[in-house]
Image (cartoon, rainbow, N blue to C red):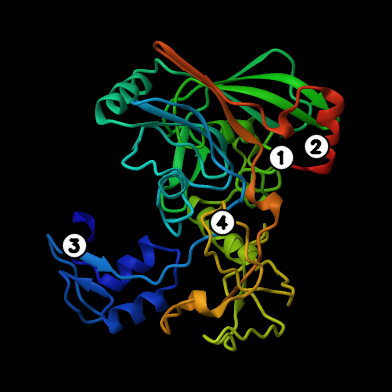
């Protein structure tokens, strides 16, 4: 917090926490839900050393897949599960109940688990937890010392080359806040090896072995090589330029421009805009709605036009991901906050293909242990079945 000292509280929240507009933080400060040392402060308050910031928020849980978490191995020391895509490991951002930690506690009564490592929210596959602190420290030490061999399976666009392909490009975190990286000389050293194990038309099934553990390492290296994961919503997107980041080419965008465009695209693709007629009673009207977010800039620097359709629904997530979805809008399950902009926001219902990415943590091997999951259906190495699966883009 030292770097925030002397800055206005509104300026800090508007810049550092971009998930919500500045106006929302302004309302929270004025309402006394965003406090300093648990006390209400004026909108122009300047932060001081040792100030304690607290923001009481009205949360909207994000939908996840209904696919179950399966247990691969469990004993008194360790738990190994096969995580479905779309479910984050632990509470973060707008996820809490729809996380692996919460679902395991609710569905399996497995509590007080120690996180040994993490995989991306959209990545499926092996996830290890310690059931006691001693085992967790032991496993973490093996990972830090690079004694753990990891194998992933992915499906990429294009005919991936034969043989072992090695990528040693350094990776830099462009923004921790929105979670985006790129290949950059200023980045940290990292290394990934790739091997094609099947090909079907313009798609390839590729085995990936990350020898370091950088953020989004496999996804960024595949983007750099020009073979992005087919349904990677981040690194297989023209927001990185016409070449989608191949060879490190982001179309001449600065890091700040890239971040702003990613935020704008995320808002445009997930929200349809503010609906002032969404009532707390559950009555929903769907007039034509314009996207209430800045549009990403195109290559000429002008504002790109994003069209939205009026067929919208409010997505109310009251399940952990295992129960059958209740497709009806039940107002009795909803709480509303008059200061919450999301209560007035029309969300797109996610499609099944929005909740999966073709990247799977397949095998982990350490000192005295080894765990493997079944391959997901999209990763079939039978070329005929693989081709059918990829054509249909089914998970």
Foreground: disc 1 or disc 3: 1
Query: Quadrant of residue 356 in the image?
Result: top right
Query: Quadrant of residue 192 in the image?
Result: top right
Q: Secondary structure at mark 1?
A: loop
Q: CA distance from mark 4 to mark 1?
A: 18 Å
Q: Is residue 221 above or below residue 290?
A: above
* Camera-nearest residue between 77 and 371: 77
Name the residue tied to disc 3: 5
Q: Secondary structure at mark 4?
A: helix
* Camera-nearest residue between 263 and 323: 323
The C terminus lies in which quarter of the figure? top right
Name the residue tied to disc 1: 230
Label disc, if present, on residue 372 of the rendered structure: none
Tell me the residue at 29%/83% (across/down): 31
Taking the image as shown, residue 163 lies to the left or right of residue 108, namely right
Q: Is residue 46 above or below residue 249?
A: below
Badge 1 vs badge 2, beta-carbon distance below 8 Å: yes
- In the rendered image, residue 50, in percent from the top left (x then y), is placed at 12, 60
Query: Quadrant of residue 262 in the image?
Result: bottom right
Foreground: disc 1 or disc 2: 2
Badge 4 vs badge 1, beta-carbon distance below 8 Å: no
Name the residue tied to disc 4: 262
- In the rendered image, residue 384, in percent from the top left (x then y), is placed at 87, 26
* Camera-nearest residue between 386 and 204: 386
Question: In terms of sequence position, does the residue under pointer 2 or pointer 4 come before the other?
Answer: 4
Q: Secondary structure at mark 3?
A: loop
Question: In terms of sequence position, does the residue under pointer 4 or pointer 1 come before the other?
Answer: 1
- In the rendered image, residue 7, in percent from the top left (x then y), is placed at 23, 67
Q: CA distance from mark 1 to mark 3?
A: 44 Å
Q: CA distance from mark 1 to mark 2?
A: 9 Å
């Amino acid at each position: 917090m030292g770097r925030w000292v002397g800055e206005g509280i509104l300026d800090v929240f508007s810049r550092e926490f971009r998930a919500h507009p500045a106006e929302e933080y302004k309302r929270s400060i004025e309402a006394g839900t965003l406090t300093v040392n648990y006390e209400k402060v004026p909108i122009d308050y300047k932060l001081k050393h040792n100030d304690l910031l607290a923001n009481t928020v009205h949360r909207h849980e994000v939908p996840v897949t209904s696919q179950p978490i399966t247990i691969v191995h469990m004993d008194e020391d360790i738990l190994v599960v096969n995580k479905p895509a779309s479910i984050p490991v632990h509470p973060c951002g707008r996820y809490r109940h729809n996380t692996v930690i919460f679902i395991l506690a609710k569905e399996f009564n497995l509590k007080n688990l120690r996180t040994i490592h993490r995989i991306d929210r959209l990545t499926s596959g092996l996830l290890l937890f310690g059931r006691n602190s001693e085992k967790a420290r032991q496993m973490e030490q093996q990972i830090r010392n690079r004694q753990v061999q990891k194998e992933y399976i992915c499906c990429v666009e294009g005919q991936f080359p034969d043989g072992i392909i090695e990528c040693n490009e350094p990776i830099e975190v462009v923004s921790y806040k929105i979670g985006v990286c790129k290949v950059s000389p200023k980045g940290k050293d990292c290394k990934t090896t790739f091997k094609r194990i099947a090909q079907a038309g313009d798609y390839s099934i590729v085995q990936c072995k990350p020898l370091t553990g950088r953020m989004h390492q496999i996804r960024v290296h595949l983007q750099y090589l020009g073979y992005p994961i087919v349904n990677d919503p981040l690194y297989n997107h023209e927001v990185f330029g016409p070449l989608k980041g191949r060879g490190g080419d982001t179309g001449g965008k600065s890091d700040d421009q890239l971040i702003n465009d990613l935020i704008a695209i995320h808002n445009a693709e997930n929200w349809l805009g503010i609906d002032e007629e969404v009532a707390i009673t559950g009555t929903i009207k769907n007039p034509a709605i314009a996207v209430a977010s800045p549009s990403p800039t195109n290559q000429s620097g002008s504002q790109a036009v994003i069209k939205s359709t009026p067929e919208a629904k409010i997505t109310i997530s009251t399940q952990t991901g295992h129960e059958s979805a209740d497709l009806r809008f039940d107002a009795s399950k909803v709480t509303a906050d008059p200061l919450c902009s999301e209560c007035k926001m029309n969300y797109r219902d996610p499609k099944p293909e929005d909740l999966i990415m073709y990247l799977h943590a397949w095998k982990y091997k350490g000192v005295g242990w080894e765990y493997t999951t079944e391959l997901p259906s999209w990763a079939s190495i039978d070329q005929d079945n693989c081709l059918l699966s990829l054509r249909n883009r089914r998970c």
